[in-house]
Amino acid sequence: MPVEEKSAMSEDALVNTGAERWPDPDSAYLAVRRMQIKLHRWAGEDSSRRFGDLFNLVYDPAFLVHAWERVASNAGARTPGIDRVTVAHIETRIGVEAFLDGIRNALKSGEFEPVEVRQVMIPKTSGKLRKLGIPTVADRVVQASLKAVLEPIFEADFLPCSYGFHPNRRAHDAIAEIHFLASSPRNYQWVLEADIKACFDEIDHTALMSRLRDRIRDKRVCALVRAFLKSGVMTAFGEAEESLAGTPQGGILSPLLANIALSALDEYFDRQWREMMSTDKRRRTRKRKGLGNWRIIRFADDFVLMVSGERRHAEALREEVARVLAPLGLRLSPEKTRVVHVDDGFDFLGLTIRRQRKRGTQKHYIYTKPSKKAIQSIKDKVKEKVNRSTLHLDLDRLLTSLNRMMRGWANYFRHGVSKQVFHAVDNHAWHRVTKWIHRKHSRLKWSELRRRFCRPGTWIIAHNGVEFTRASSVKVTRYRYRGSTIPTPWTPRPAATGIGG
């Protein structure tokens, strides 16, 4: 047997931790993290390596306890799957260790089979409905354990241009890169603004499994992933439907699987960049020949191609994108895919990005601010929270809930040019709340309402120690562009390389 193969097998043998009892959550976290660091390092050291003997990790007690902690602490812990079992039910009636014992034994014996996800239709801001698939708690725990095993391996391969559903990465990083590329002296001013139609519903299972097997040779792990893909859907009408394509939104594993599939798009344009545009000299040469240069920035199934050149260069990329997506069973959404100049502005991840002349100067800069759609969304949420149906609440309870919602919204948009927008949203909310107070206490005059429900001598609404804090209380700050130096949780010392222009 070749020395390299012996070495690989000895490393894979270390994957099985051999734990036999249920550890406490802290010990489980440390054990999982140690193993994830190893997996990530091995994947980074050899990009062609295919991992075997991983299934033992999926049912390892440390990984299952860690997975349970994630599922139990999630906001959806109270949401049941088709079996109507919740986290609270398991904790009070079954017992967590007994529950995990059942999962572990089923996985070890090969008897574990995912069941259908419970389909829930969620309204979108466009008026359409989004399909969510809610797995059972048992399936969620197995998915969380499986993700803990697979994610460190694939994160070693994922490229810096992808920002959605990656640890330590966020939407602001994608916006910052667009800002960087569109600004002088790089001037990537044409934008192919793209959206994949029903991405999570239409990913081809065969193509996805092929990309998974490029890294994973453990047949039991691959079979488990495929079982989740094929588990089916239980509709709201109680009808079981097959899962012929896609990975249902709502599952813990789905975002990782979607990124594995869509990394084909990242790799295609990254290969073009490295082969044709990676140096200043190459980009200048292409420009002299009338050719364009471009870079992709992707957040899940939303992405843009920033183009330095002419409109025709951006238009031509539309067909290239379609050709890359076709083998994955995916297609572009015609109504959401367009070419636009940065001077005209475009919306991405809730922000409007546009180049404008700075007031009082002749210089142009890239500005980002909350989009009209995002502003209307928060106003609609305020209206929904502050209306006749909530008149039974005490004002302090209403303010607590409203403050939490507006602060969360403002925290997301605080890195844009948002100060005026925050004040406008505050003004809208203030008027809604004052009308709510007047409706609740219709017999009282405004002077009495102000005395009771505002801070003395002001119009700042407050009651029982709770004050309306407003979106504008969130400080607007500039987001620091991190380039390609964003570390994963398993790489404490990232390579200090930036993105070329």
Image (cartoon, rainbow, N blue to C red):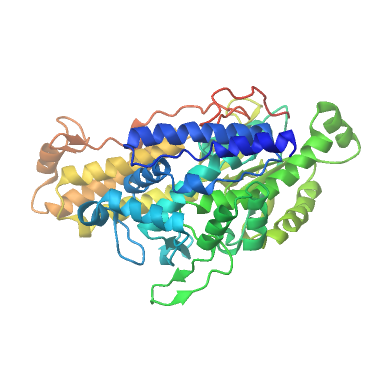
Which residue is drawn at the image coordinates 32% and 60% (left, top)? 80
> In the shown orientation, is residue 328 left or right of residue 243?
right
In front: 134, or 440? 134
The residue positioned farthest toward the front in the image shown: 1
Which residue is drawn at the image coordinates 85% and 31% (left, top)? 282
Identify the image quadrant of the C terminus: top right
> In the shown orientation, is residue 411 left or right of residue 467?
right
> In the shown orientation, is residue 283 left or right of residue 222?
right
Q: Is residue 165 visible?
A: no
Identify the image quadrant of the N terminus: top right
**Residue 392 in the image, given as x and y percentages of width and height:** 14, 55
**Residue 332 in the image, given as x and y percentages of width and height:** 66, 59
**Residue 242 in the image, given as x and y percentages of width and height:** 52, 72
The residue positioned farthest toward the right in the image shown: 289
Q: Is residue 459 visible?
A: yes
**Residue 93 in the image, given as x and y percentages of width and height:** 21, 56
In front: 338, or 283? 283
